[in-house]
Image (cartoon, rainbow, N blue to C red):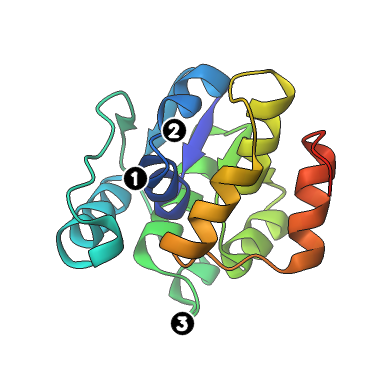
Amino acid sequence: MIVVADTSVILNLCFLEQQDLLHTLFGTVYAPLQVEAEFQRLAASDRRFLGLVYPGFIKRANPQSVHHSWAHSPVLHAGEIAALSLALELGADLVLMDEAEGRAVATSLQLTTMGLLGILIQARQRDFIPAVAPLLERLQQEARFWIAQPLRDAVLRAAGENV
């Protein structure tokens, strides 16, 4: 399975100290250098993420080209553009991305996406983590990760946790 990750998923899994879920669930995960650079910038400048370390097991790979019509979109960040470009070049089976705009572009490119919440659901369903609810609480309270209440409830139901 070929999996390409964007910054938010990696950053928030590191914040939760659950970055190993990437390797456990997907094996090899690729990310472009722009994603690592964005991670490093946030780990050095954003109080929520200070001191986080980029996972060494993520394979760094840059896309050969980012000259797509959507690559000039003002709503996509450099990491998203590079991740989508790399996913296309590698023929990725899955793109790990949280941002709605990036996921919409991925869908238009016929790329399958999964976000942080989907990863947590899968990890819980496969008993790699004991519960999702405390992780969601930390994300919302400490990392300021926004989750609408209906989505939170759906995630907990999918994870087999009482709502």
What amino acid is found at the position of numbered circle 3 in the picture? Pro
Residue at 68% across, 28% down: 124
Quarter of the image holding residue 72? bottom left
How far from the left and from the top, in percent, is residue 95? Answer: 57, 43
Would you name the residue on which mark 2 appears?
18
Q: Amino acid at mark 2?
A: Gln
Q: Which residue is mark 1?
A: 64
Q: Disc 3 vs disc 2: which is toward the camera?
A: 2
Q: Is residue 99 above or below residue 127?
A: below
User: How far apart are labels 3 and 2 at the CA level?
Assistant: 31 Å
Q: Is residue 150 above or below residue 40?
A: below
Residue name at image x 42 percent, y 42 percent = 16
Question: Where residue 74 is drawn, which disc sits there?
Answer: 3
Query: Depth-wise, is mark 3 or mark 1 nearer the camera?
Result: 3
| Relative height, residue 132 to residue 100 (above, below) | above
Q: 163 or 93, which lies in front?
A: 163
Mark 3 Cα-neighbour bin, 10 Å: few <14, some 14–19, many ≥20 = few
First in sequence: mark 2 vs mark 1: 2
Of residues 45 and 129, the one drawn nearer to the viewer in this rendering: 129
* Residue at disc 2, secondary structure: loop
